[in-house]
Image (spheres, grey):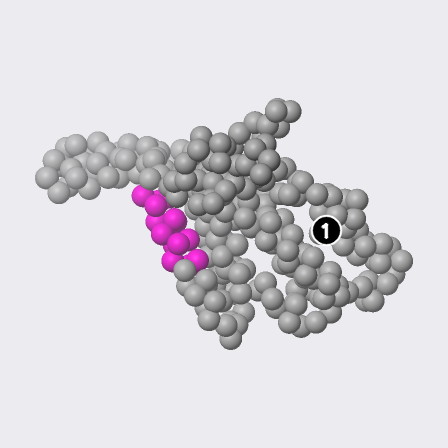
Amino acid sequence: MNDSADLRRILKTWPYDPEHDARIIRGEDGREVLQVRTPLGLEQYEMDGRPDGLRPHGMETALEHHLHRLNQAKFAGRESDFELNPQECSELFHEGTLYYFRYVRLFQLKDWTRTVRDTARNLRAFDFLHRYARREEDQQFLEKWRPYILRVHASAAAMLEVEKGAYDEASRVTREAIRKVESLDDLDDETSKFERERSLMALRELESQIQKNRPLSELEKLEHQLRRAIDTQEFERAARLRDRIRELRQQNIC
C-alpha cells in the first residue's frame, strides 16, 4: 500500500466527534473549504459554487446550464416545448443533494449567509423541476421536502436579522415562512406530513424565542413599570409613568 495514500495519519489529527464533526479551514491556496469528519474518513466541500468543485456542461452548475437552455427556448418563442427529461431531472436531483449536504453543515456552523444562499438555490431548483419536468413523478419528487427547506432557509435568514438586532424583521421572516408552509398543498405522503408538522413546530418555536429575547423598547419598558406600579399601589409613580407613556405615544403619532 502506498503510504502517501493512507489517510490514517490525517484522521488521527482530527478524531471523530459527532458533536464537532465539521469545520472551515483554508487550503494551501488560501481558499476556504468545508471539511466534515465522518466515522470512517473525511469529506471536503468547496465553500462557493458547486460543492464538489465541478463545472457540468462548462457552467457553474447543472441548474444554471438548464436555466440557460430555458432562456434560449423563451427567446426563440418555444418555452412551451421546453421540458426536463428523466436523465436531466436525475442530474438536478443529484446536484441538489450536494447542496443539501453543504447547507446542513453550514447551518450547524451558524454560517447563516451561506445557508441562505444554498437553500435559496435549492428552492429555485425545486420550482424549476416542479414546473418543467416531463414526468409527473419527477415534478413531485422533491415536494415532500419543501417544508423542511423553507424552514432551514427562514431560520438562517431570521438569525441573520437577530445578529443585526433587527428582531422585528426576524419575526416577519419566520411568520412569512409559517404562512408558506401552512399554504402548501397537502400531499398523500407520510414524509411530507411529517416534515410539514415538524417545520411548523420549529418555526413557531423560533418565533417565540425571537420575541422572548427581543429587547424591550422604551415604551414597552414604561408600560411594564406602570403595571408593576399599579400592582404595588404606587399611584403617584403610576401617574408619572402614564404621562411619560402619553408623551411617547404622541411623539410616535407625530
Q: Give yes or no for residue 200 being in the magenta stretch.
A: yes
Residue 136 screen position, x and y as percent: 67, 72
Number of numbered markers: 1
Q: From the viewer's side, name the closer residue of 152 and 251.
A: 152
Identified by mark 1, the residue type is Ala
Residue 177 drawn above or below residue 112: below
User: Can residue 146 be seen by looking at this rendering?
Assistant: yes
- Residue drawn at point x = 59 percent, y = 32 percent: 4
Residue 2 location, quadrant: top right
Q: From the viewer's side, name the closer residue of 177 and 141.
A: 141
Image quadrant holding the C terminus, namely top left
From the image, tell me which residue sits under label 1: 62
- Residue drawn at point x = 75 percent, y = 66 percent: 85
**Which residues are the magenta region?**
199-212
Residue 38 screen position, x and y as percent: 47, 44
Residue 219 location, quadrant: top left
Horizontal side, residue 196 vs residue 214: left or right:
right
Crowding at dot 1, Cα within 10 Å, few <14 / some 14-19 / many 20+, comes out as many
**As drawn, which residue projects farthest toward the front?**
1
